[in-house]
């Protein structure tokens, strides 16, 4: 075990870490929010249940990792609405009706 006299570190020079301030436009892209929008649009337009569920999952992930409140909340809410709209049209919407035979 080394003694304190041989320690080259200076405890008086130690400073706590301060995270640098980053402008909102310099933040990295929220890929999970973007993927949620894409899956939400595909789920609503093409009536894919899996895409709608993935949109909801990616929206929740993006919501939990939100950095910029204003921009991210708009994107997340849009993706969530597309996902919910896709699920509603898939599970509660009207399907193709058979034509009556004469």
Image (tube, rainbow, N blue to C red):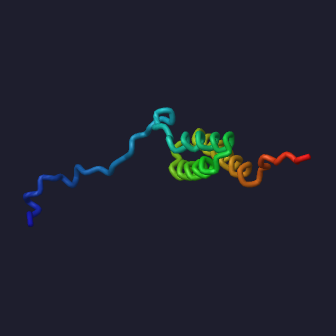
Q: Nearer the viewer, residue 39 or 32?
A: 39
Point out the image quarter for the N terminus: bottom left
Q: Quadrant of residue 69?
A: top right
Query: How many numbered discs, if any?
Result: 0
Q: Is residue 89 left or right of residue 40?
A: right
Residue at image coords 37%, 46%: 18
Q: Position of residue 94 (x, y in %)?
A: 79, 49
Residue 73 is drawn in which quadrant?
top right
Identify the residue at horizontal 25%, vertical 51% (top origin). Answer: 14
- Which residue in the rendered view is the most extreme toward the front? 102
Residues 2 and 56: in front is 56
* Residue furthest bottom as drawn: 1
User: Residue 67 at what x, y percent from top left?
Assistant: 51, 45
In percent of width and height, residue 78 lies at 65, 42
Identified at 88% across, 47% down, the residue is 101
Left or right of 59 on screen, residue 99: right
13 lies left or right of 84: left
Residue in front for this viewpoint, 45 or 22: 45
Q: Residue at x 63, y 43 (%)?
A: 40
- Tell me where residue 9 appears, x and y as whole percent: 16, 53
């Amino acid at each position: 075990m080394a003694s304190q006299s041989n320690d080259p570190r200076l405890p008086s020079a130690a400073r706590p870490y301060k995270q640098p301030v980053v402008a909102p436009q310099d933040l990295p892209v929220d890929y999970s929010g973007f993927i949620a929008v894409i899956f939400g649009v595909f789920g609503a337009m093409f009536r894919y249940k899996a895409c709608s569920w993935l949109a909801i999952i990616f929206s929740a992930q993006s919501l939990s990792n939100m950095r910029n409140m204003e921009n991210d909340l708009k994107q997340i809410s849009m993706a969530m609405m597309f996902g919910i709209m896709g699920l509603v049209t898939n599970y509660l919407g009207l399907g193709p009706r058979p034509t009556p035979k004469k």
